[in-house]
Image (cartoon, rainbow, N blue to C red):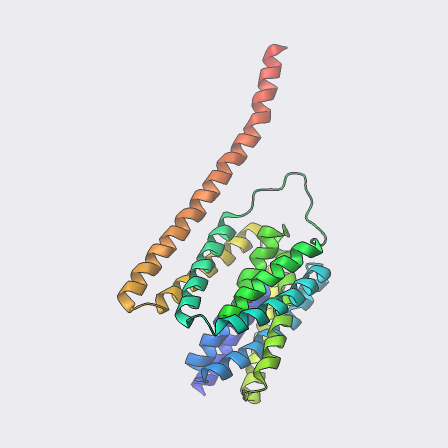
């Protein structure tokens, strides 16, 4: 009973992560189901796909009501991502698991640095209603290929792709990412059900708890400033990336490498924010200097 209670409580946090950040579902659900619920790895992955897919589908609702979903972008990205994920899954058998997870962890840290640093402000340029279809297809295939290779982390790549590359505001990127995650999760689940049996009672309890969390996270997302939400997402990815990286090496070496990687990520992120802030001050100061010069000339 203790394990079940801890699993359900952890599922609420998974839902909050999905609803608030648009990611974190699979990378949290699989360890929860393996180490707390004591499920075999493949059953845990299949169950996590059900939990994350259903939770993401329901979690879209509060975002949709608040007009934080770009439906065309999400559906096209999802279809392209499913294609890339299938190709990535076929390629994964030729690459050692340790290599895949190490590369994934390093990519997570690079993504985290980009999210914390943020984009350069688009002066006078409104956020796009929908992203160009060719760009969405390309990003979707690439993200799907990577997530198919490593088997998790869709939201950790979809949100940055939409926010950093596509230029969508962070809350809109979160809402749209849930459409993509739901599509890819159900596609993956369909593949697993042919060879894996699921404990439907446990899956139902975990899914219900995660849905409650996602609705709570979705309501919170609209009340948190965009910059704070983006940085929180970035730091969350740092923690998960360090954890994954540390698990791939012997304890001492893994800890040392994880600390170095985390320190490098923090340095890049902080340096980028300071540089951007300095550039912003220069841009703000330039008109003032011009006005002073014009007044002197008069």
User: Looking at the image, can residue 275 be seen?
Assistant: yes
Please tell me which residue is depicted at 66% across the width and 60% down the height of the picture: 137
On the rendered structure, is 115 left or right of 103?
Answer: right
Q: Return the x and y of residue 66 as percentages of the image width and height.
A: 70, 60
| 281 up-or-down from 239: above or below | above
- Farthest residue to the front: give it: 94
| 219 up-or-down from 282: above or below | below
- Farthest residue to the top: give it: 298
On the rendered structure, is 257 left or right of 26?
Answer: left
Please tell me which residue is depicted at 45% across the width and 48% down the height of the picture: 269
Q: Nearer the viewer, residue 238 or 253?
A: 253
Residue 51: image quadrant is: bottom right
Residue 103: image quadrant is: bottom left
Q: Return the x and y of residue 187 as percentages of the image width and height.
A: 62, 76
On the rendered structure, is 73 left or right of 26?
Answer: right
Quarter holding the C terminus is: top right
| 185 up-or-down from 65: above or below | below
Please tell me which residue is depicted at 67% across the width and 39% down the height of the picture: 124
Q: Nearer the viewer, residue 274 or 40?
A: 40
Q: Return the x and y of residue 72 as percentages of the image width and height.
A: 73, 61
How many numbered marks, from 0 up?
A: 0
Please tell me which residue is depicted at 53% across the width and 64% down the height of the picture: 146
User: Looking at the image, can residue 174 be seen?
Assistant: no
- Farthest residue to the left: give it: 252
Q: Return the x and y of residue 119 as percentages of the image width and height.
A: 56, 46
| 295 up-or-down from 187: above or below | above
Quarter holding the N terminus is: bottom left
């Amino acid at each position: 009973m203790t394990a079940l209670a801890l699993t359900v409580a952890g599922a609420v946090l998974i839902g909050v992560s999905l609803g608030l950040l648009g990611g974190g579902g699979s990378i949290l659900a699989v360890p929860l189901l393996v180490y707390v619920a004591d499920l075999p790895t493949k059953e845990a992955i299949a169950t996590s796909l059900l939990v994350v897919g259903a939770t993401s589908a329901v979690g879209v609702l509060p975002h949709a009501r608040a007009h934080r979903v770009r439906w065309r972008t999400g559906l096209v990205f999802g279809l392209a991502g499913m294609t890339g994920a299938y190709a990535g899954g076929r390629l994964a058998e030729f690459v050692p698991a340790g290599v895949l997870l190490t590369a994934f962890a390093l990519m997570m840290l690079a993504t985290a640095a980009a999210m914390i640093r943020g984009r350069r402000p688009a002066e006078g340029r409104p956020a796009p209603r929908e992203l160009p279809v060719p760009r969405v297809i390309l990003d979707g295939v690439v993200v799907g290929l990577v997530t198919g290779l490593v088997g998790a982390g869709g939201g950790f790549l979809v949100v940055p792709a939409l926010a950093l590359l596509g230029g969508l505001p962070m809350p809109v990127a979160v809402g749209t990412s849930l459409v993509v995650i739901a599509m890819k999760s159900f596609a993956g689940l369909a593949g697993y059900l042919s060879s894996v049996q699921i404990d439907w009672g446990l899956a139902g309890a975990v899914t219900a708890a995660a849905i409650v969390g996602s609705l709570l996270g979705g309501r919170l997302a609209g009340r948190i400033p965009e910059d704070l939400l983006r940085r929180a997402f970035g730091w969350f990815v740092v923690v998960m990336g360090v954890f994954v990286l540390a698990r791939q090496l012997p304890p001492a070496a893994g800890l040392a490498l994880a600390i170095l990687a985390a320190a490098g990520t923090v340095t890049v992120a902080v340096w980028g924010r300071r540089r951007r802030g300095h550039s912003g001050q220069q841009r703000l100061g330039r008109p003032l200097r011009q006005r002073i010069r014009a007044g002197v000339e008069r």
